[in-house]
Amino acid sequence: MPELPEVETIRRKLRDGAPESPSLVGKRIVRASLLWAGSLAEPDPDEFQYRIIGQTITDFGRRAKFLLIQLSEDTLVVHLRMSGDLLVESEDDPVATHHRFLLHFEDGTRLAFNDTRKFGRIWLLADPAPLFKKLGPEPLGESLTPEDFYARLEDRRRQIKPLLLDQSFIAGIGNIYADEALHRARLHPLTLASSLTPEQAATLLESIRQVLQAGIEANGASIDWVYRGGEFQNHFQVYQRAGEPCYRCGTSIERIVVGQRGTHFCPQCQRP
DNA sequence: ACGAGCGCCTGTCGGC
DNA sequence: TGCCGACAGGCGCTCG
C-alpha cells in the first residue's frame, strides 16, 4: 500500500491506537516470529532474535516511506514496498496466509507484518541514519522551500514523472500521488524537469503537498483486494481513471507507460 | 546522468 | 472452464 500518506496513517494508528487496535507504545516484546526469512534485511536471524527480545516500544516515526518503530535500545525499520501492511492482533487470532513476521508482546497482543508479494523488508538497527543516507528531502518538511525545489529541478535533464518517483530527488512520493500532483499542477508527466519555470516549480511543490495532505486526511488510499480503512481512492482525479472524464474539463483521461509505470493524465489540462 | 529491462513475488482481471 | 498475458501503491541492479 505504501506511499507517504499510507505509511503515515499506519504510524498514527500504531502510535495513538484506533478502534480494535490499541496503541503499541509501551508494549514489551517477549518473542519474534520470522515466518518468511527473506523479509529480514538486517541483522542475521540469530542476532535479530537475541537483540529484540525484552525491548519496549517507545515511539513510532517515519522517514519517507520507511516506518520507524523506536525501541528502548534499537530502531526496528519497516518498508512495506508494494503489498505490506501492519496489523495489531491478539495471540488468539489465526496467523493469516501472508503474515511474514510477528512481534509478540507481554500482554497477549502482537504486531503482524502481512506482505503478499514478499517485497517488504525489516531492519533492526542501533542507528538507522545510514539507511536513509541517499534519500532526498521530505516533501512536507518546512525546510524544503520552493526556491530549493526549483534549484533541484533546474539541472535535471529528466522527465518529471520518473523524477518525482526517484527517492533520492524527493522522498515519499509513489505512483498514485505523482500522477495526482502532476494533474493538480497541470504538468504533462513527460515534461523535462529542467524546463520548469520557478513559478511552475512552486506550483508543483504546492500540489505535491496538497495531494499528500489530502491523502493523510483521508487515512490513505485503499485499493485492490485489501481494505485498510482509508478513502483517498474516492478522491482520485486521474489515477486508475483512464477513459473517464477529467473532473476539470471533461476530456478523457489517458494512460501511458513512463519508466515502466502506468501513468494517468488529462491530455487537455496537462499539455506537453 | 539517464532510461530501459529485469528480477523479486503473489494475486486479480480480462480476453480468447 | 482453463490458459495466458497484462497489470499492481517499490526499488535495486546491470547495461548501454
Image: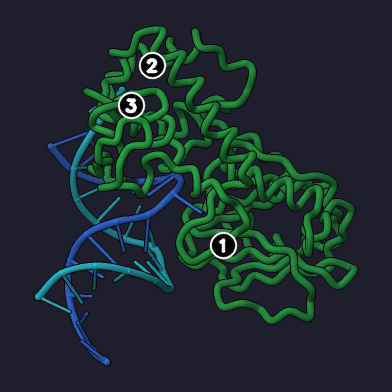
Chain colours: A green, B cyan, C blue
Callouts 1 and 2 on one subunit? yes
Whole-percent x, y for residue A9 in the image: 66, 46
Q: Are the residues at dot 1 and dot 2 in contact (C-beta closer than 8 Å)?
A: no
Whole-percent x, y for residue A44 in the image: 62, 60
Residue A162's place in the image compared with A107, above or below, is above
Q: Earlier in the sequence, mark 1 or mark 2?
A: 2
Under circle 1, the secondary element is loop
Location of mark 2 (residue): A153
Give the position of the C terminus of chain A as an image quadrant. Answer: top left
In percent of the image, x 62 and y 40: which residue is there?
Answer: A216
Residue A80's place in the image compared with A53, above or below, is above
Location of mark 1 (residue): A227
Q: Amino acid at mark 3?
A: Ile
Residue C1's place in the image compared with A227, above or below, is below
Whole-percent x, y for residue A225 in the image: 48, 66
Q: Earlier in the sequence, mark 1 or mark 3?
A: 3
Q: Amino acid at mark 1?
A: Tyr
Is residue A28 left or right of A260 when viewed as pictured? right
Q: Chain of mark 2?
A: A
Under circle 3, the secondary element is helix
Please state which of residues A21 and A41 is positioned toward the viewer in this rendering: A21
Location of mark 3 (residue): A160
In percent of the image, x 23 and y 32: which residue is there?
Answer: A267
